Each structure stands twice: as C-alpha cells, then as structure tokens.
Image (spheres, grey):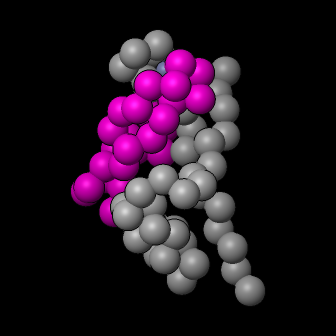
Amino acid sequence: MSSSFNFNGFSEIEKALSKEIEKGAKEQAIDFLKTNGFDVICPFCDKEFLARTVHETCPNCSKTIDIDFNVTQS
Ligand SMILES: [Zn+2]
C-alpha cells in the first residue's frame, strides 16, 4: 500500500522544487530531489526524514511513501 504525498509549505527546498515543477520540469525536480534530498514528514508516523527518491521508505515505520509532484501547467 502506498499513499500520495503532496508538498505543502515545507522548506526552501520545497519552494525550489515547486519552481521547477511550475516550469514543467518535473524531471529536473526529481533530479533536484536525488541530488539534494528532501525533508518529508511521514504521513504514517509523523517522523521527519530525508527522501532522495519519489518512492521512499520511512526509516521509522518502514512504510513506503510515493511522492507525487503536483504538476500545474497553464
Ligand atoms: Zn513513518
């Protein structure tokens, strides 16, 4: 089982990611994620950890989070 996880107002990195996503550069955003990592809060156990892929396993509860970029295009 996996869960969609949307970013809403996390960190500076999130803002940078959002910028890339707004430009329609989802792959660049994913590269950014791989390079820099991204602090996420596990929706299952509320622990923060560093995600580096869009399909990350929480080190605390071992559940898998699918990070879903919301790509907004005009
Ligand atoms: Zn967890």
Residue 55 location, x and y as percent? 48, 38
Residue 31 location, x and y as percent? 35, 62
Above or below — where is 53 with respect to 29?
Answer: above
Q: Nearest the camera: 52 or 50?
A: 50
Give the image quarter of residue 74: bottom right
Above or below — where is 61 with respect to 34?
Answer: above
Q: Residue furthest right?
A: 74
In the image, taking residue 2 as reference, residue 9 lies left or right, namely left
Q: Which residues are magenta?
A: 30-56
Q: Nearest the camera: 39 or 9?
A: 9
- Can you see residue 25? no
Which residue occupies 70% across, 80% down?
Answer: 73
Give the image quarter of residue 44: top right
Residue 10 location, x and y as percent? 48, 53
- Can you see residue 52? yes
| Quarter of the image that includes the N terminus | top right
